[in-house]
Amino acid sequence: MNLAPLVGHGTARIGLCGYESKPLSPSELTLLTNKVGQCLGEGALGASLGLMYKPGRYAPFEELKAVAQVVKEHGKVLTVHARACSAVSTSYGLPFGGRPHNIRALLEAVDLCVQTGVKLQFSHLIFVGERSFATVDACMDLIDKTRERGFPFMFDMYAGTFGASVITVILPAWYLPLRPEQKRSPLVRARLAFEINLSKKLLGFDFSDILIAYLSPEHQAYEGRTVAQIAREEGAGELETYLRLVELSGGNGHVLMGRYYHQDIIQRLARHPGALYMTDAWIEAAGVQNAAAYGTFPRFLALSRDHSIEPLPQTIRKMTGATADRFGLTDRGYLREGAFADLACFDLENVYGNVEACEDPRGIVHVFINGAAVLLDGSLTAGLEEKPGRILK
């Protein structure tokens, strides 16, 4: 496959101070922005922020703004995974009063775009937990007003109702930097239990919505089961079980999390002029695969065929040419003479992708990458070892 890399703000920050939660000193911030600028100059298509994950969640707004300004100077794209995708999130304080947390997180991204003028790609616009569904109107209104003012703000989205994440994603920002002995303190456990249980109740999300995709080679027996199932089978509390699974994975486990959307929201977002389509998925080396890696784009094609979203030309554009334009790729994303032959030929009447269970999509007939056939008549070609994919700069 072709790969178009971004430079990770979190990666650069780890190179400076690891996973420490401290703010950067002025000299460290200069080193950070210089490194991001160097990578952009070497061909990265943009920079990415992962603000729900450590160490990105420790970065204050001014640090993010400095990174955004460098990206703007290079004319590239800043992609932002916000601090919260749900009305209640452990990225913020206790959920009492004030704006829903996902709206606060969206406002932070909007402010980055407005204050720097950077091309901002909000990755991805999802609404986790049933209580978050009520915030859709407010979020879309904020995005519409930002775009109406002329700021280059767009978002991406996918066709499934769940997504992949790291196992620590629901843990509060104050908890993650603690030493192991501190995490086992009764007072720390009591505070953690109170915050997570309150968040679950207010959010409409539970441990039955967290499925273990991967822990480690030694713990494959847990794969494919929810935290709630494992707790029942082992006769333990759900939070206790979850924390033990985090420890078993060294904090590096992968999970699949449910209740991200419902179909009406998916179709509404898909029709928005500021939307691009994406999978939010990758193929794992081991463990339970994310069905979105197999079925997302075929699912969008099927929705378009069935008149649930935009007509086919606009649907195809949002997964090809519009994305190439957004990230500054030339001679990609368009079917024309002289362009790179990255082609997918599909049977419109039969195309279908399952985004709830891992299975091969239907109706994909031929695939070419840089002019080389990798799929013919629905079967992988014998010459696949040639690896025609490239790094795109």
Image (cartoon, grey):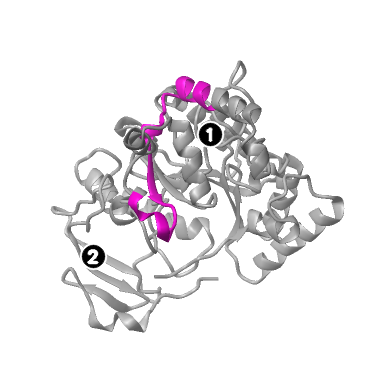
Residue at figure coordinates x 19%, y 42% from the top left = 306
Q: Secondary structure at mark 2?
A: strand
Task: Locate residue 271: give its quadrant.
Answer: top left
Q: Position of residue 46 (x, y in %)?
A: 60, 59
Residue 357 in magenta stretch? no
Q: Is residue 10 visible?
A: yes
**Residue 109: numbered disc:** none
The residue range painted magenta reads 196-221
Q: Is 37 above or below relative to 228?
A: below
Determine the main secondary structure of the stretch shown in magenta: helix
Of mark 2 and mark 1, the one earlier in the sequence is 1
Residue at figure coordinates x 38%, y 46% from the top left = 212
Q: Is 98 above or below relative to 327?
A: above
- Mark 2–mark 1 contact, CB under 8 Å? no
Q: Is 380 above or below relative to 183?
A: below
Q: Nearer the viewer, residue 377 or 253?
A: 253
Q: Position of residue 24 (x, y in %)?
A: 79, 49
Residue 211 in magenta stretch? yes
In the image, taking residue 349 as reference, residue 269 lies left or right, namely right
Q: Secondary structure at mark 1?
A: helix
Give, as a three-letter code, the residue at label 2.
Cys
Q: Position of residue 304 (x, y in %)?
A: 25, 45
Residue under label 2, please give it: 345
State the residue lying farthest toward the front: 235
**Residue 143: numbered disc:** 1
Total marks placed = 2
Q: Position of residue 117 (x, y in %)?
A: 67, 46
